[in-house]
Amino acid sequence: MKKRKAESRKRKAASDLDVRFPLSAFGFPPTLRWIGGVDGHLRLIDQTRLPVELVEIECRDAQTLWEAIKTLRVRGAPAIGVAAAYGVCLGLVAKRKAESRKWGRGEGEKGRRAEPQTPGSPSPRLPFSPSANATIDEDRFFARLDEVTAYLATSRPTAVNLFWALHRMKQKAAGLRGAMPPAQIAAELLAEARRIHEEDREMCRAIGRHGATLLSDGQGVLTHCNAGGLATSDYGTALAVVFSAVESGKRLQVVVDETRPLLQGARLTTWELQQRGIPATLICDSMAAQVMREGRVQAVITGADRIAANGDTANKIGTYSLAVLAAAHNIPFYIAAPSSTFDLSLPSGDAIPIEKRDPREITHGFGRQTAPDGINVYNPAFDVTPAKLITAIICERGIIRPVTRETIIEKVSTGQRPVIPVS
Ligand code: MRU
């Protein structure tokens, strides 16, 4: 009976994975992709199901995407940013479609409210609707845009790429206001989201190229969490450096931190490395010091969720400990991140908001209780590594070394778009 249920579950998972769409060079679908035109939807790999199942889910409204970001179905700073940009399109168009259907049935404007798909998740009122009066239309469109962006901004607080992408979408729309009707602005916003997506892809490749120069043949490279293709549009940041070095003929041994409590290293990074046939060894986070002491690591590379103006860097909890350990063992510690991860409005890492997550991720990880009922739990999802522990930051514009306010401004400030404040 149990076996039959498991088989039917497997069959269901397999049918969720729509293989009609082009697979990547490594035989799996892209992290996320927009399907269709302006009234289309977003498909993304559900990362909570890896490495056991490779399944895609569809987000057809902003609420579903909000839930996907919150629960880490889509995760990693750049991927969250790209997803949020498409989320704006979902929020503007999904409701409009629903409303048109209602008008078709003669229901007028009454009762227009989207049902939240996640119990307890905030659900904004969605007032945007076509009207005979173009000015009202435009006002509603922009009110709706404000609501959708504010709503998506509540999904996660630390990765600045989320706020950067939302701000960029708003700026794009603001620049077009008055010049074209809302429906056309919506189409331009989809084009902007696609641009953000494509730029991210290019930034990752450039990060890989720059970073690969820092690694030598035969080295052991330790990484934490997942900063690979799954955390970005494609190719990754920290893992892009590894991929690019390997593609250029260097042989590397990658040591992968498990990354407690949600195991992004164990579940996702090892999976990505296996897909590409790159030798990888999984360790528990607490083993890093011993592995370094044994001389198995010659470089540490991680991604970032937000980099302050002075170079202090927020990344997955456990990154700071690795930086301290790397310094103690005289091992270079690198951060790889695109310019969209820098937040020059923050003078130092002290101002970076750190997400605190559900205690049950620690006490009941992956369905099994591992701590007594009632125990106090503290679960910050990120930590801040001080700039002085970072040997260099690899970004798409080159290598920032040493990591100081001046070198960061020199490399990143041109063309930098300010972020909207975190609410
Ligand atoms: O909580 P997560 O899984 O979203 O955390 C991800 C990380 O900390 C990554 O290292 C970071 O976002 C960079 S991804 C290229």
Image (cartoon, helix red, strand yellow):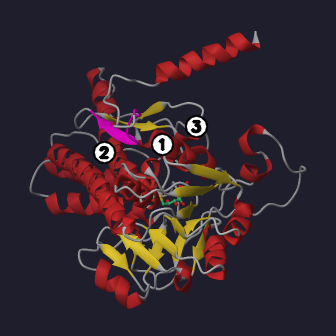
SS type, badge 1: loop
Q: Secondary structure at mark 2?
A: helix
Q: Is residue 71 visible?
A: no
Q: Please name the residue shown 65% across and 56% down the image.
A: 259
Could you give the CA–CA distance between mark 1 and mark 2, rounded to whole angstroms?
37 Å
Residue 277: which disc?
1
Tell me, yes or no, whether the highlighted magenta stretch contains residue 34: yes
Residue 91 location, quadrant: top left
Image coordinates of residue 290 in percent, x first then y, are 74, 67
The residue sitting at the left extreme is 179
Residue 362 located left or right of residue 255: right
Look at label 3 and name its amino acid.
Pro
The mark closer to the camera, 1 or 2, is 1
The reply to whether residue 112 is in sight is yes
Reading the chain from its start, which is encountered first: label 1 or label 3? Answer: 3
Q: Position of residue 132 (x, y in %)?
A: 15, 40
Label 1, ligand 1: CB separation under 8 Å? no
Given the image, on which type of amino acid does mark 2 rest? Cys
Q: Which residue is mark 3?
A: 51
Residue 160 versus residue 152 in the image, above or below:
below
Q: Earlier in the sequence, mark 1 or mark 2?
A: 2
